[in-house]
Each structure stands twice: as C-alpha cells, then as structure tokens.
C-alpha cells in the first residue's frame, strides 16, 4: 500500500465498488444449497457420551443457522 498514491487508492476503491455493485445485481438468491454431514460425527459423539440422547431428534449447528 505504501507504493500507491492516494489517487491510485481512491481509483482502486471506486473500481471495486463498481464491481461489487455489478456482482450484487447478478446475484441469484432463488437457489439454496444445504450441506448435510452424513456421518453426523458431532451428534454421534454426543450420543456416545450421553446415551439418553439416542432417542431424541437433534441437529448440529450454530445460532446463525436458526
């Protein structure tokens, strides 16, 4: 960054802002992808450690998934 002039930095920022705007307009949010951990590793470990969980439905994730 030290090699760039303030004008070059402003120009690069403007170019990136234009690119972001273009990409946002082309973004298609009508499709979704879901990744399912078929091994259910984390759930299996919890069920191993607490067998009472074996008969209870569960999901593994974070609050951001809710």
Image (cartoon, rainbow, N blue to C red):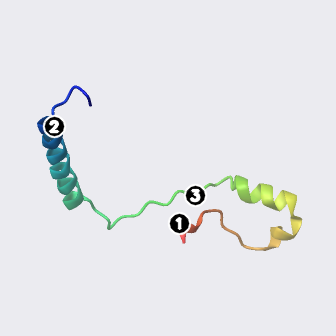
How packed is label 3: few (under 14 Cα within 10 Å), some, or many (20 or more)? few
Question: Which of the two residues, 45 or 7, is positioned nearer the viewer here?
Answer: 7
Q: For numbered disc 3, what is the local secondary structure?
A: loop
**Looking at the picture, how far across and down is residue 13, in whole percent?**
19, 45
Task: Name which residue lies at 16% across and 37% down.
Answer: 6
Q: Which mark is residue 6?
A: 2
| Spatial CA span between label 3 and label 2 | 47 Å
Closer to the chain start, of discs 1 and 3, is: 3
| Residue where numbered disc 3 is placed | 36
Viewer-side label of 3, 2: 2
Identify the image quadrant of residue 55: bottom right
- Residue contact between numbered discs 2 and 1, judged by CB atoms under 8 Å: no
**Looking at the picture, how far across and down is residue 10, in whole percent?**
15, 43
Left or right, residue 29 beside residue 18: right
| Spatial CA span between label 1 and label 3 | 16 Å
Viewer-side label of 1, 3: 1
Q: For numbered disc 1, what is the local secondary structure?
A: helix
Closer to the chain start, of discs 2 and 1, is: 2
How packed is label 1: few (under 14 Cα within 10 Å), some, or many (20 or more)? few
**Looking at the picture, how far across and down is residue 37, in whole percent?**
62, 55
Q: For numbered disc 2, what is the local secondary structure?
A: helix
Viewer-side label of 2, 1: 2
| Residue where numbered disc 1 is placed | 64
Please determine whether, in this image, residue 55 is positioned above or below residue 61.
Answer: below
Closer to the chain start, of discs 3 and 2, is: 2
Give the mark count.
Answer: 3
Please determine whether, in this image, residue 7 is positioned above or below residue 25.
Answer: above
């Amino acid at each position: 960054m030290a090699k760039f002039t303030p004008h070059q930095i402003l120009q690069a920022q403007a170019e990136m802002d234009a690119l972001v705007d273009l990409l946002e307009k082309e973004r298609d949010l009508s499709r979704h992808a879901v990744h399912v951990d078929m091994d259910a590793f984390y759930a299996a470990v919890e069920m191993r450690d607490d067998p009472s969980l074996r008969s209870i439905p569960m999901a593994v994730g974070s609050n951001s998934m809710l």
